[in-house]
Image: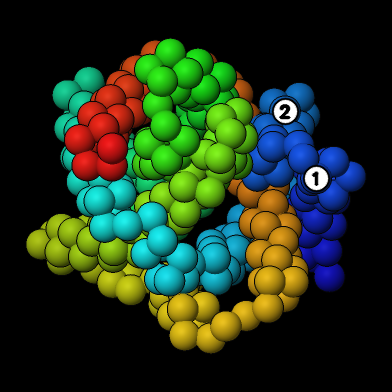
Amino acid sequence: MKLVPGLLVAVFLAALAYAPKVLLPNLTISPLLTVILLGMVIASLMQLPFTWKPGLQLAQKPILRWGVAGLGFKLSLQELASIGGSALVVVVVSTVAALAFGWWLGRRVGLPDKMNLLLGVGGGICGASAIVAADTVVQGEQSDSALPLGIITLVGTVGIVVYPLLGNALNLSPFVYGVWNGASLHEMAQVIAAGNAIPDAISPSTVTKLARICLLAPVVFYLGWMLRKKEQNVGEAKVPLVPWFLVVFVLLAAFRTLVEVPKSTAKLVEDLDLFVLCVGMAGVGLFSDFRQIVRAGVKPILVGVGQWVFLAALALALTLIFCK
């Protein structure tokens, strides 16, 4: 029973954030970003009751992990193949380069190691979901994950406005614009919002973004191996080599590839998974507050923006070279 109060709060905030998606289907504001912001506002304005904490911890850890695992159900190799090998090359090269650049830049300005790893993964792959997945092996403090979440929300919102303006100014074709958009914006909702602004760009945008999400599992596996090796060297092997939820992620992706699922069923499962993610993200937001961002100073913001600019420029250059 001690889990009930906090879990109910998380479910209530998730429902508030999810309601606009149901009532206004064309609205492109991400429920995940909305629920994180709701939680952070509440955490900034009040001291959380002690009775909430057990349920919120359940939302923040196991429930959220299940939500991330469920993202694998969105992935189908047949769908990814539809954008072609050249677009996949753009995704892999730009993402790997952005991860390396972001981590390098974070070290150069002196960010804490764990915050730097999480910020780099969030900016390089798929925003909030990537940060949650990576935190399973990074095992950072609450502020280490809360700050990257806030930065990604800020940067991605700017991108929704800037990308269509640049796409029109550069006279990009819908396919080129879509590949660039999907390869460089953070959250899927941000990619959809920016993709909707250019006629016929939404399909290549979303499929390219799904290809980028595929890199989540190998990147987190790599982080787990690297950190486990580091801890073994100092006699503390605490990092899980293979997080259980990434195994489920891969199995669901394999299932979706091998089994033809009716569109209505697939949408129902994906919507349910989004709500589960919202419940988990409510827990993340309620254990964070905006004062943490203020205390962290300008360096994390500079790293987040720097990585995004690097990724956007590289992805655009590669797209123009390979996908014209």
> Is 323 situated left or right of 231 in this image?
right
| Residue 25 badge | 1
What amino acid does circle 1 point to? Answer: Pro
| Residue 41 badge | 2
> Is 273 situated left or right of 17 in this image?
left
- Whole-angstrom CA distance, mark 1 to mark 2, is 25 Å
Q: Is residue 253 above or below residue 144?
A: below
What amino acid does circle 2 point to? Answer: Val
Determine the residue positioned at 47% across, 47% down: 204
Determine the residue positioned at 53% across, 49% down: 203
Helix, strand or loop at label 2? It is: helix
> Is 110 situated left or right of 28 in this image?
left
Q: Where does residue 196 sit, x and y in percent of width and height?
A: 61, 35
> Is 51 situated left or right of 186 in this image?
right
User: In the image shown, does 239 or 202 lie closer to the viewer?
Assistant: 202
Q: Residues within 10 Å of mark 1 (few under 14, many from 20)?
A: few
Determine the residue positioned at 43% across, 71% down: 78
User: In the image shown, does 95 or 127 lie closer to the viewer?
Assistant: 95
Q: Earlier in the sequence, mark 1 or mark 2?
A: 1
Determine the residue positioned at 85% across, 41% down: 24
